[in-house]
Amino acid sequence: MARPAPELLRYLRTLRRFWAASLAAELEYQANFVLELLAVSANLAGSLFTLSLFYGHGHDLGGWSWDAALVVLGLYTLLDGLTTTLLQPNLSTIVTHVRTGTLDFVLLKPIDSQFWLSARTFSPWGLPGLAAGAVLVVVAAVRAGARPDALHLVAAALLLVASALILYSLWFVLAATSIWFVKVWNATEVLRSALVAGRYPVSAYPAGLRLFFTVVLPVAFLTTVPAEAILGRASPLWVVSSLLVAAVALLISRWFWGFALRFYTSASS
Amino acid sequence: MPIIRAEGLSKTYRVADKQPGLLGTLRHFVARRSRDVPAVSEVSFAIEPGEIVGFLGPNGAGKTTTLKMLSGLIHPSAGTVEVAGCVPFRRQGRFLRQISLVMGQKQQLIWDLPPLDSLRVNAAVYGIEDAEAHRRIQELADMLELGDELTRPVRKLSLGERMKAELLAALLHRPAVLFLDEPTLGLDVNAQARVRRFLADINRRTGTTVLLTSHYMGDITALCPRVLLIHQGHLFFDGRLDALTERLTPCREVRLELAEPQPAAAFAPFGALESLEGRRVRLLIPQEQLTGAVARLLAMFAVLDLEVSEPPIEELIGRLFQQGVVG
């Protein structure tokens, strides 16, 4: 037997193979690229239009300037791109694995099953969204006159990672419930719609919803908090709590997967 | 030392007890009741490295459940099991690298991609270096007579080609134990024969221990010197195949299509009447009386069509259990 490569290296090699294989599969359908580009443009145009309605008559949104609100919208577009690239294609597959029983193959591979299920596919069709989001964030931040120092940029980067992890964990836990309810696809759609709330700064919502989007469904941590950091006005308290929420969410997703698997392996036939 | 050891292995499923109909559904919704159904009870056996063992039994006998407990996919309710020195259910890396599972009705290969892409993924997962993986793929592909099928999308392969590619994917990491659940399901006779030849080959060359379930008696007779017979979750027979076939009355199944329907009693002298539907008749006739019986059948009735075949394993085993020869 060949000497086993160090674990991290093995996971990285596997990830490269995963994505190379899924790129090969996806690129068979070139028309998708054009369609996705159109969809991203239409979505973004729609959001911009809605946002402009709020600002049309000299109003603002929860104390956010137009350009600052665009940073939030940019971050939302970025996360939506991430969803299309990684979350949606991978986590919808969990349902298929459970329904067809091919989850068995995943469980018998000497690799972390949550890693396999979360990273197996890579869909390039979310890349236009990722790019558009990134451009919007930078342009809007510059226009808003943001002069973040190095510390704020580091905080922003950390918060972006945290928001991606929170989003991932929410999504993964929901997808993992397919072990019990094989048809959860609708539930993840509901989640995606709820996350649309993240297009706008959380302070734009009434107090009750604001609380909901912070504590129950942590939408605030997804876009508003990182946007504050990019605009150079993040409070340390928010940064720390955001990182904590991300860590807890990730741990919960891992624990929940273990719990779901124990159920799967004792009840399935 | 045995590579697989099961002692008092049992699995009980908890199933929902639901009455049919709307009322039953409502009642079930309000007050859930469930009961325990034993799938496997007190099964014990030991398998030595390099053996090929066949798992036999009617549908729902507990074959797949046992296989899944051995491969670590389900947790036994009671009893102990050890495979390759590990407890399967823990699914440690050391264990998973030593086993492989092939299922006839499920596939691990990526549907839209050529098998080679899935094989590369597997190589990375098992930490096999590129050059080594390439060599192994070449070697197994030669044995399986696979060529450019490996570079064609899986969805464009025939069922037989797909199963061969599945076997390749399952053996890339050179497992010590190979579990197969109905590996020849749905394959045509040629493909079945090729799969069997390959399994015998790989067992001889690498000493891989093979444990398979199959509906086709052909698979078992061609491959397995030893069989485990499971019925209603209990192990009824563990021994050499020839000892088992001696216990099974050697019968042939004769299917007839008659010009005119006949009463059931008309077939009593020939053998056991399996079914009678209008002009279609199925009979089980002891092998030594077969030629005589067929000649008499043709003489007595206006026969439109006649077919003689080996009765399906399910039926032989079913008869076996009815007669109470074992157990």
Image: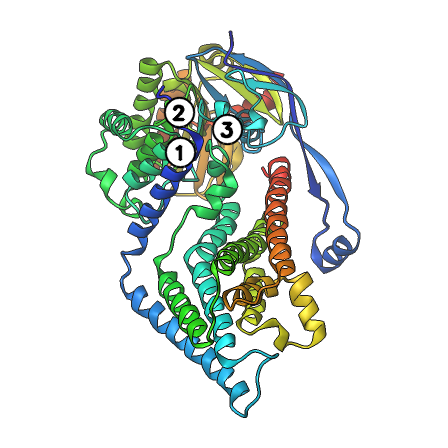
Query: Residue A213 in the image: x percent, y percent?
Result: 65, 66
- The chain that hosts pointer 1 is A
Quadrant the C terminus of chain B occupies:
top right
Closer to us: A210 or A95: A210
Residue at 59% of width from left, 48% of height from top?
A250
Query: Residue B153 in the image: x percent, y percent?
Result: 27, 46
Identify the disc placed on residue A10: 1
Q: Secondary structure at mark 1?
A: helix
Image marks 1 and 2: residues in contact by CB distance under 8 Å = yes
Q: Secondary structure at mark 2?
A: loop
Q: Does mark 2 fall on the same chain as mark 1?
A: yes
Q: Secondary structure at mark 3?
A: helix
The amino acid pointed to by label 2 is Pro
Q: Does mark 2 fall on the same chain as mark 3?
A: no
Q: Which residue is mark 3?
A: B315
How far is disc 3 from disc 1 in space, using C-alphas? 49 Å
Query: Residue B312 in the image: x percent, y percent?
Result: 45, 29
How far is disc 3 from disc 2 in space, using C-alphas? 48 Å
- The chain that hosts pointer 3 is B
Q: Residue pushed farthest left?
A: B148
Identify the disc placed on residue A4: 2
For this view, does B53 lie left or right of residue B90?
A: left
Residue at 41% of width from left, 30% of height from top?
B254
For this view, does A20 lie left or right of residue B15?
A: left
